[in-house]
Image (cartoon, rainbow, N blue to C red):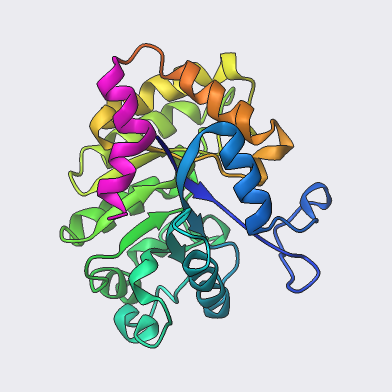
Amino acid sequence: MIVDAHHHLWDPRTRAYPWMPAELAAPFTLDDLRRVTQEAGVGRTVLVQTVSDLAETQEFLDVAAASGGLVAGVVGWVDHTRDVPQQVAGLRHRDLLKGVRHQVEDEADPDWLRRPEVVAALGSVGDLVVDLLVRWDQLPAAVDLAERCPQTSFVLDHGAKPPLGTPDLAAWRDGVSRLAAQPNVTGKLSGLFTLAHQDRLAPAVDHLLDAFGPGRLVFGTDWPVSTLAHDYRTVVERTRSLLDPLDEADRAAVLAGNAVRTYRL
């Protein structure tokens, strides 16, 4: 079994997505997800927020509840400057909410995660995971956050999008290593195929594997954003290829077991 620990659903006919390029401006539904996961041999998924709107979080929980177990969990949006348990207390299907995320990469301030109200809010999430969608220059603040919230479980989305082929790659490598040194942080192999060809990705993937180890990495397709590079099945197959150096048990951990444990699926 494979667990896709990072994908989205959306419908631009009913909601605005300020970040979305024209190439992605089409509906992607639960039925579409069923089709592509079946073709790729994916058994369970984690549905991740796309906009800063608690209403979307509720919609995604409703989708998960109606999915027959395919969508095993939701990482929804909450205001990261306010008490998190209070915000989610009234949601339907609350048991399917496994984590929270804010698109921190869109915050201009590289120290946004150091703000006292953010630290206080993310230190109060209880058993919810906090997915970190950050730029490479926000990694030092993410390290401080993880240190200050040792009881909170964090997941680094998309490996902080390594700035391949730029002078900033060394700072990315250092930031990832420092963040991975925090025992409450897990890395996520996701969203990489839209950054570069597979051959150029291998060194970044190797660094993520070295930093986090196969016991603290989860896999996600980032579908449908990933369709900018490949179809769903190809993303799964090419990720498998990047994990070829691992033994069978470690590959199984990255592709399924770690996500089940991290997100309590």
Q: Is residue 15 left or right of residue 142?
A: right
Magenta segment: 247-265
Q: Nearer the viewer, residue 96 or 189?
A: 96
The kind of secondary structure the magenta stretch mainly shows is: helix
Q: Quadrant of residue 130?
A: bottom left
- Is 161 rendered above or below residue 207? below
Is residue 175 something one can see in this rendering?
Answer: no
Does the magenta portion include 258? yes
Q: Is residue 229 left or right of residue 209?
A: right
Is residue 108 something one can see in this rendering?
Answer: yes
Identify the residue at image location x=53%, y=68%: 60
Identify the residue at image location x=39%, y=29%: 173
Identify the residue at image location x=24%, y=74%: 124
Q: Position of residue 262 (x, y in %)?
A: 27, 49
Q: Nearer the viewer, residue 9 or 149?
A: 9
Looking at the image, the residue that sits furthest to the front is: 68
Q: Quadrant of residue 92?
A: bottom left
Give the number of callouts.
Answer: 0
Q: Position of residue 51 (x, y in %)?
A: 60, 67
Q: Position of residue 99 (x, y in %)?
A: 37, 63
Identify the residue at image location x=28%, y=28%: 214
- Is 35 rendered above or below residue 201? below
Q: Position of residue 172 (x, y in %)?
A: 43, 34
Q: Can you say which quadrant of the picture contains the C terminus?
A: bottom left
Does the magenta portion include 39? no
- Is 182 rendered above or below residue 124? above
- Is 7 rendered above or below residue 242? below
Q: Is residue 88 left or right of residue 37?
A: left
Q: Can you say which quadrant of the picture contains the N terminus?
A: top left
